[in-house]
Image (cartoon, rainbow, N blue to C red):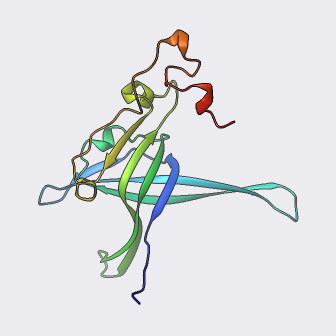
Amino acid sequence: MASRSVNKVLLIGNLGRDAETKFTPSGAAVTRFAVATTRSWKDPQSNEWKEETNWTNVTVWRQENLANYLTKGKQVYVEGRIQTRSYDDKDGKKVYATEVVADEVILLGGRGDSAAATGGGFESASRPASRGAASSPRSSGPPSAPAGDDDFGGMNISDDDVPF
């Protein structure tokens, strides 16, 4: 029987800095940014809440316009795979770098956020090679209902759609 393995990363966090896009010598766009994820827990000895923030470097290939949307403080959903690479620094010492190579990046946003103004609450970018089609920002759903008929801000949601 063949062995199986899975290399899948899902992150929801905030951008620690604006994304930067650079180009390889062959012209491929490489966008890089860092995502902060925070976990909280209650310390059993002191009965106090503790918090820990982890920073994850993310790389997205062939999405040159993505950096325009990914600015410091924005909340993002990232889906991809973890990768460790190595290189020799200027002193000849081997350096290892671990990062998430993203297949999908979705800008999360709510009302009043600039993401809501640009496309209904989120922007998405998928790697064309893995999805089979070039991606572009997409809308979050069907056209909105008239404001008088919809208590959920024009999102075409009824009371039956809310799970609580």
x, y percentage for residue 46? 88, 61
Q: Residue furthest top?
A: 148
Count of marks, rendered view: 0
Query: Is 135 in front, or is 148?
Result: 148
| Above or below, 20 relative to 92 | above
x, y percentage for residue 47? 87, 58
Give the quadrant of the C terminus: top right
| Above or below, 18 relative to 26 | above
Residue at (53% x, 49% y) in the render: 13
x, y percentage for residue 82? 42, 68
Q: Quadrant of residue 130?
A: bottom left
Using residue 50 as the reference point, say whether residue 127 is left or right of it.
left
Residue at (29% x, 74% y) in the render: 90
x, y percentage for residue 84? 38, 74
Query: Is 62 in front, or is 68?
Result: 62
Using residue 23 as the reference point, say whether residue 17 is left or right of it.
right
Q: Residue furthest left?
A: 26
Using residue 148 as the reference point, say whether residue 25 is left or right of it.
left
Residue at (40% x, 58% y) in the render: 58
Q: Quadrant of residue 107?
A: top left
| Above or below, 137 relative to 86 | above
Give the quadrant of the N terminus: bottom left
Query: Is 93 in front, or is 72?
Result: 72
Residue at (49% x, 25% y) in the render: 155
Q: Residue furthest front?
A: 160
Q: Quadrant of residue 25?
A: bottom left
Query: Is 161 in front, or is 83?
Result: 161
